[in-house]
Amino acid sequence: MMNASDQIKPYFIENRTKIMIGLLSLIIVDMLQLFIPRIIKRVVDDLTTFNMDGWQLLSFALFMIGIAVFIGIFRYIWRRCLLGTARRIEEGLRNMLFAHLQCLSAAYFDKVKTGDLMAHATNDIQQIRMATGMGMVALNDAIVLGLAAIGFMAYINVSLTAYVLIPMPLIVISTRFFSKKMHRGYQTVQAAFSDLTEVIRERFAGIRIIKAHHRNREEAARVEAASQNYVDENIRLVKIVGSFFPMMLFFSNLSLAIVLYLGGRKTIMADITPGDFVAFISYLGLLTWPMMALGWVTNLIQRGRASLDRIHQILQIVPEISDSEDADFIEEAQGHIIFENVSFHYGADPEEQGITTLSQIDLEIEPGTVLGIVGPPGCGKSTLLNLMPRLYDIQRGRILIDGHDIRTLKIQNLRSHIAFIPQEPFLFAGTIRENITFGDQQIPEDRLKRAVRDAALDDTINNFPAGLETVVGEKGVILSGGQKQRIALARCLLQDSAILIMDDPISQVDLETGTAIINTIRKMAGQKTIIIVSHRLSAVSYADCIITLDLGHITECGTHRQLMELNDYYAQTYRLQEIEEDLDAA
């Protein structure tokens, strides 16, 4: 298993040329800064001995301007190379995280908060970028600029330099002490940020329900509580960081006080020149930033390490559903489906909980036939459909498609042969066209129009001024439930797969529209294997086979006529719905 730091190593290797150029430019900037105190020393010494005229003074001034120009040029280069690389690391990690999340099974997202994942993809990765970008800069300055400044100070006077460096061991000790506290603090803060993000996301998503039930104050209080917790954790962290940085400044000022006293005495006693004294103070000023950088880089690295640990935990999660090494491949599916003693349960061991969603399902669906599935709410209908594209994996038994156990097939290949409409249709905040085509620009216009017509959606689209280019808003907010359901149906029909799975496709449409959709589905019988779940039994009455599920078991199986003769759940529910439809028509 990789360490957290191993996640970003490939990006450093890929961009090592730019990193080397950036670090070289940064070192050049540091070296150029170190020459400025030498110029000041020369000027001060010549001025105090009256050995400098106006032209010499001007030449030194122009020389310093030239150094400043080169510092600006090389500073641009290192910022472009180092901070640009940090941005690419940020992009790469975010793409890696999203790609990995897409590989995880649906069961993972049943347990994880969306707000937590959003915090990982935004705030955590941003902290990693800061640690790899400015953290690298601060670390380089702390080492290169710090050691070089000490070298120049020792060149002026060794004993004075030794006195100035007295606080340095205290900096190392305090850094080690505070770094552990900061690491724990940043982990807690990031967790609090995840909770706050999730609370706010839920309130935004449910804003209409909150308004409808007049729960504004109560929900605002929940957001305020989560926000207060985030602030409290940050305040605790600020107490640690707020103690660390003033301590760095204190040590720096302590060194300055030593220089003023001892260096001043050496200047009076002519052990060093006034120019040396001024240059020494300038070098001490340059040394202050590396001392501060040592504290800042500790801050950045601890924050980035805490975030990288959180990202690492997700990237190390092994997908429950994945391709095997010798996975099979179906070139062209026929749609022959067999369930052999299939059992499934959610969550914990069913023997401990006493809960089994599906139990001992035995079923065969011939190619080109229509299977209808009915039953009371919570009986396992949607779960049965979710097992076929392997959104969840069965615990016992097996499911065969064209003689292949679906667990031995490549997942992408399996799902490419299945068009699936979930019970709750989901729309993206784009146009109707983009939602139907999933953004695929290569789909011919005639195929798109045919899918729209087959989903009984053409009249609705014609009523929109922008037609297919109508922006539906977040989750299709401008559309009715029936319109969203028909867009999801058109998306499924456009896929043109051998197996068509529909979970209650007409539950939110009126009787006339539902009849039109059912007639479209009936026309596809014989061409595709169709599995349809519906609470409206007239939608499955034409099916070649109808099964009734109850408490995870198949309790009825047969054609419409056979089930009506049994006079059990199907027949009783069908007659009751006939009466309701007659009353609605009247």
Image (spheres, rainbow, N blue to C red):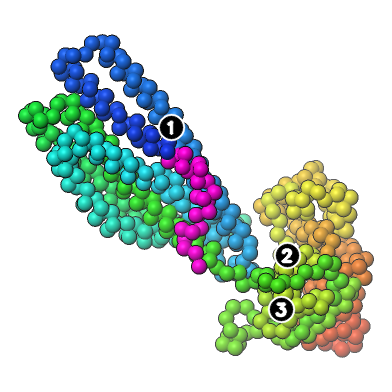
Q: Which residues are magenta?
A: 1-23
Residue 521 visible in the picture: yes
Q: Main secondary structure of the magenta part?
A: helix
* Relative height, residue 50 to residue 254 (above, below): above
- Which of the two labelled residues, at mark 3 and mark 2, occupies the earlier sequence position? 3
Marks 2, 1: nearer the viewer:
1
Element type at mark 3 = loop
Q: Position of residue 61 (x, y in %)?
A: 31, 18
Q: Residue beneath label 2, please?
A: 412
Q: Position of residue 137 (x, y in %)?
A: 40, 43
Left or right of 214? Residue 444 is right
Name the kind of residue labelled 1 in the image. Answer: Phe
Say if the magenta span includes residue 546. no
Do the CB atoms of the residues marked 2 and 1 lie less than 8 Å apart?
Answer: no
* Relative height, residue 318 to residue 144 (above, below): below
Comparing 458 with 384, the one in front is 384
Comparing 442 with 190, the one in front is 442
Residue found farthest to the top: 54
Residue 282 found in image quarter: top left
Name the kind of residue labelled 2 in the image. Answer: Gln
Comparing 569 with 520, the one in front is 520
